[in-house]
Amino acid sequence: MPHPETSREAAVEENLTIEKTRLASEEQYHVLADAMPQIVYTALPDGELDYYNKRWFDYTGTTLDETQGRGWEMLLHPDDFPKFNSKWREALRTGETFETEYRFKRASDGVYRWHLARAVSIYDGDGHILKWIGTCTDIEDKKREAEAFAARAAIVEAADDAIVGKDIDGNIVTWNGGARRLYGYSAEEIIGHSEAMLIPFDLPDELQNILATIRRGETMEHHETVRVRKDGKRLDVSFTLSPIKDGQGKITGIAGIARDITEAKRSEAELKRSNAELEQFAFVASHDLQEPLRAMAGTVQILQRRYQGQLDARADEIISHAVAAVTRMQTLVSDLLAFSRLTRHGDPFAPTDFAMVLADVTANLEVAIAESGATILSNDLPIAMADASQMRQLLQNLLSNSIKFRGERPLEILISAQREDNTWHFSVQDNGQGIDPLYFERIFVIFQRLHTRDEYPGTGIGLAVCKKIVERHHGRIWLESALDIGTTFHFTIVD
């Protein structure tokens, strides 16, 4: 039987060994905790904190003495403390895992930043809590990112346009409120299904053509097509599709925005029909007015030849006014007829050498150029798809305009062109009188004049003709001008 003294010594030795093991384990724990990027702490069963790792002191800028007891509470945002305290007390009472979010002051700038706090209880063999081990993780940046993402998601969801995400095979993965309103399907009904659900049967190849375009890394902008709603109604839509790429540049999906243009297309068709009717009316009216005007002109001209000087001065004046009025009317009707023919009787587009067009125009204006002393210059002009006869008319009208409204300086006109994507941008620049910006829009309206007929002849149709020619070539026309400095007319045509 062992000696009692020997047994006590063995027990003391065992306890010392256990304590050394515990201290070594605790030291290893502290070394590990100090290396962690999060705040790590431990607490006694009653909740009093008894250890903080190095991250705590670096982040809070406090000392151990300052945080003894409940000194750490001063670092919590006052608005968050009641919630924190309530949950901590509940965890201490039940032993359940403690978890909450609160704002914690950072010493480096005094800013309260959001943290996620978690603590778990450690039990002994009898089921009693020995200690609490907890962490605090700075989640400010992630929280801001989540809020920003939620805000973006809310904007996407509330957008009027249909915003749809698809995988690289065309299967729908996201579906916003605009898509639900446009197509009639809920997100639950369509997510996971192919976009083919929305494509009419008479466009069997469209989805594969779209996927091929996206897989090449290309974007489809303002593509107009037809889609089918859940109720079977066909919609005219305009959509833009862009490839979605991962961090390595691999295409992983498709982002799409679609808009219902059914009413716009209907209005466009109605406008085209109305314009066609107006053009037809203008053509018929101006054409049918030619003959009575010729008869009227002949009659007043006979009166002028036969009776000029045989009646009193007042009669001569009346006859002269009648001749002038009929002549003006003939010119207006002739110009209106020419204007109405621009779209109806234009030549097909063909490769057009604009250098040759300019040469023809300067030949036609030879007398006016000589009388005005104008110098006509040009940069390299392109060969582009256009109606050559209408381009001659366009340039002739613009050059005539510059010559007519020249200033006191010797007139110089420069015609130039430059390529911009699929369009040619032309400019006709002069150093003439210039135009007041108040009249920039009015100047392209048919029969609008900025001067009286006594000052400058003409019907006010020339620039309206230019605008119509440019629009037929799918371009636009505008000007820049300053009084007494000069004017530059710009126009584009799609090549």
Image (cartoon, rainbow, N blue to C red):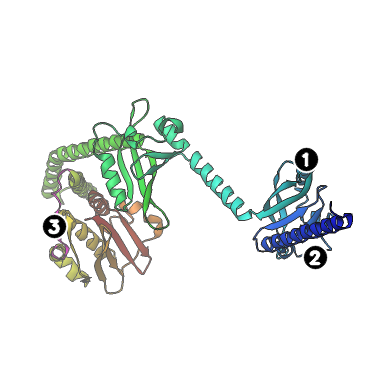
Report the residue marked by disc 3.
351
Considering every residue shown, the one lying at the far bottom of the view is 410
Report the residue marked by disc 1.
90
Considering every residue shown, the one lying at the far top of the view is 231
Residue 20: percent from left, percent from top: 77, 61
Asked whether the residues under the numbered discs 2 and 3 touch, taking CB atoms below 8 Å apart as contact, a structural biologist would say no
The amino acid type of the residue labelled 3 equals Pro
Say which of 314 and 487 sits in front: 487
Quick check: is 3 in the magenta stretch? no
438 is higher (above) or lower (below) than 93: below
Crowdedness near tag 1: few (<14), some (14–19) or many (≥20) residues, C-alpha within 10 Å: some
Quick check: is 347 in the magenta stretch? yes
Residue lying at 52% horizontally and 46% vertically, measured from the top left: 152
Say which of 484 and 125 sits in front: 125
The amino acid type of the residue labelled 2 equals Thr
For label 1, the SS is helix
185 is higher (above) or lower (below) than 32: above
Residue lying at 37% horizontally and 44% vertically, measured from the top left: 167
